Amino acid sequence: MDRKEAYQDKLQAQLDEWKAEIAKLRAKADKAQADAKLKYMEEVDELRVHQKKAEARLEELQHAQGEAWKDMKSGIEASWDEMADAMKHAWKRFS
């Protein structure tokens, strides 16, 4: 496995973990009272936007040729940091 594949696998594993966490938050939102449910659903929708952005960045990486993927790392890591921050924020609001 080369470095690009290892990096992709790492990113995919994190995306999979976030998807599972979003599903847990969605389930929690479904159980909430009407007012709280609206806030929770808005939070879940925001997380999905970040998730889709992260998935798009991973797809760009997968299609990068040669060493071009290395040039993409900083942008990808910025997307990952945004998603991680959004997840932390969401869990605080759901707690």
Image (cartoon, rainbow, N blue to C red):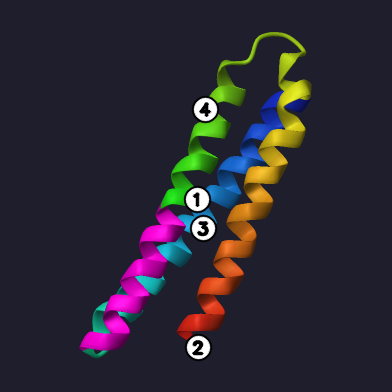
Q: How far apart are marks 4 and 2 (CA)?
A: 33 Å
- Magenta segment's dominant SS is helix
Identify residue for label 2.
Answer: 95
Q: How far apart are marks 2 and 3 (CA)?
A: 17 Å
Residue furthest to the top in view is 66
Q: Which mark is residue 18?
A: 3
Kind of residue indicated by mark 4: Glu
Split into 4 quadrants, where in the image is the N terminus? top right
Residue 92 in which image quadrant: bottom right
Residue 4 seen anywhere in this rendered image of the structure: yes
Kind of residue indicated by mark 1: His
Q: How far apart are marks 4 and 1 (CA)?
A: 14 Å
Q: What element carries label 3?
A: helix
Range covered by the magenta-colored residues = 34-48
Question: Magenta stretch: residue 46 in it?
Answer: yes
Identify residue for label 4.
Answer: 59
* Location of residue 29 in the rendering, given as x and y in whole percent from the top left corner: 31, 78
* First of labels 2, 3 by sequence position: 3
* First of labels 4, 2 by sequence position: 4
Left or right of 13: which side holds 66? right
